[in-house]
Every structure is written in C-alpha cells, then in structure tokens.
Image (cartoon, rainbow, N blue to C red):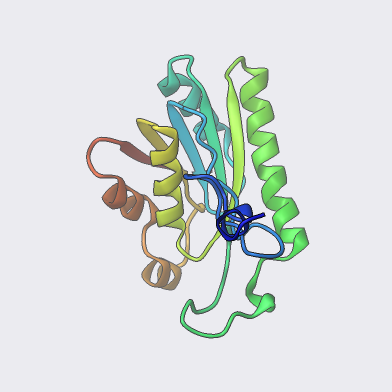
Amino acid sequence: MTVAEADTAGAAPAGGPVRRRFGRRKFDTQPAQPAAVLIASNGVAVPNAALRLARRVSGGEAIAVVSIARLYGSGLGLQNPGLMPTRKELAEQREIVERAVSSLEKSGSEAWGQVAITRRPAKTIAQAARARGVGHVIVVRPVQPARWRRTVEGDLVKEVARKLGSDVEVEGVSP
C-alpha cells in the first residue's frame, strides 16, 4: 500500500460521512429521500391534526418525519456527556417518529422518519427540509409554552421559516 492509498483508505467518498483515522464515523449522512412534506417535532408527540394536514398537503407524495432530541450546553466549552440525551430520551423520540410513520403508512402514504440530536433545532429542521426537497414544513409546537420559555427559546416556526426562505411554506400545529 502506497502512502497515497494509506491516506485515502480511512477517508469517505466525496459527499459521504467524514471518517476519523481510527474508530467510528464522525456523523451520519443526512437522509435524502425526496418528500413533499416534512413534519418536525421538537420532542413532543405528533398530533393527529398534523398528520391529517400532511396527508392533505402532500397530494399522495412521500412524507418525512423528524423529531429533535435536544443537546444542552455550550458549543464553546468542553464537551460533557451529561449534556447529551439519555438512552431513554432517545427511545422516546424514536417512538414518536415510529408512531407517526406507522400512522401515515396505515393511511396509504409513503413515509420516512429520523431522530436528530442538536443544539439548534431550527437549523437542523431547515437542513432536513433542504436535503429532502420539501415544499411544506409542519412544525409541531407545545400546547401553550410559558412566556419565559417563549422568550428564551424563541418561536421555532418563525426561525425555520426565516432559514428556509419564501420558497418553502412553514406552518405550526399544536396538539
């Protein structure tokens, strides 16, 4: 094996996930199956109203479901494993996605699901929408968040709409 081959042996193909020299992948690739509608949940269960709206807007095309597991902490400080979501929290997010996908498939729609761990939910939702080429994003919001929580976290629907621009319609649905 030459030096050039040794340098490229651990590297991923262009556009693929970045590999460290030794060990696991640094991150998973973004799913890119095309979809007409993206249902995004910020850790809460997807209500039936959001599923009905997605079926109506999709026009028979595929629907994607993304649930966000929050990563707390500072991106500037030292990483702390205690800030990552626990296995139980990740299992809850997977269950939310599985319930939504199975409900959509029972109604005859094609659907895919994904759980994303991030500090910035609006940015991650926008990236998932761009990767799948959706024309409509449905964001599930909590019923009535406290005023202080709205002030600290902001309005997720407005942030996603700002990041995606005017070519994608963003709508918020409460359970």
> Which residue is most to the bottom?
77
> Tag count in the figure?
0
User: In this view of the protein, which residue sits in the foreground, 16 or 129?
Assistant: 16
| Residue 72 screen position, x and y as percent | 56, 73
> Which residue is most to the left?
166
Residue depicted at x 46% and y 43%: 128
Q: Quadrant of the C terminus?
A: top right
Residue 159 appears in which quarter of the rendering?
bottom left
In the depicted structure, whether residue 104 falls above or below residue 162: above
In the depicted structure, whether residue 44 falls above or below residue 168: below
| Residue 110 screen position, x and y as percent | 58, 21
User: In this view of the protein, which residue sits in the foreground, 5 or 119?
Assistant: 5
Q: Quadrant of the N terminus?
A: bottom right
> Left or right: 6 with respect to 124?
right
Residue 66 appears in which quarter of the rendering?
top right
Residue depicted at x 69% and y 36%: 99
User: Taking the image as drawn, is residue 100 in sight?
Assistant: yes
User: Taking the image as drawn, is residue 138 in sight?
Assistant: no
User: In this view of the protein, which residue sits in the foreground, 30 or 151?
Assistant: 30
> Left or right: 91 with respect to 156?
right
| Residue 30 screen position, x and y as percent | 53, 44
| Residue 79 screen position, x and y as percent | 59, 80
Residue depicted at x 44% and y 30%: 37
Residue depicted at x 48% and y 76%: 75
User: In this view of the protein, which residue sits in the foreground, 44 or 124?
Assistant: 124
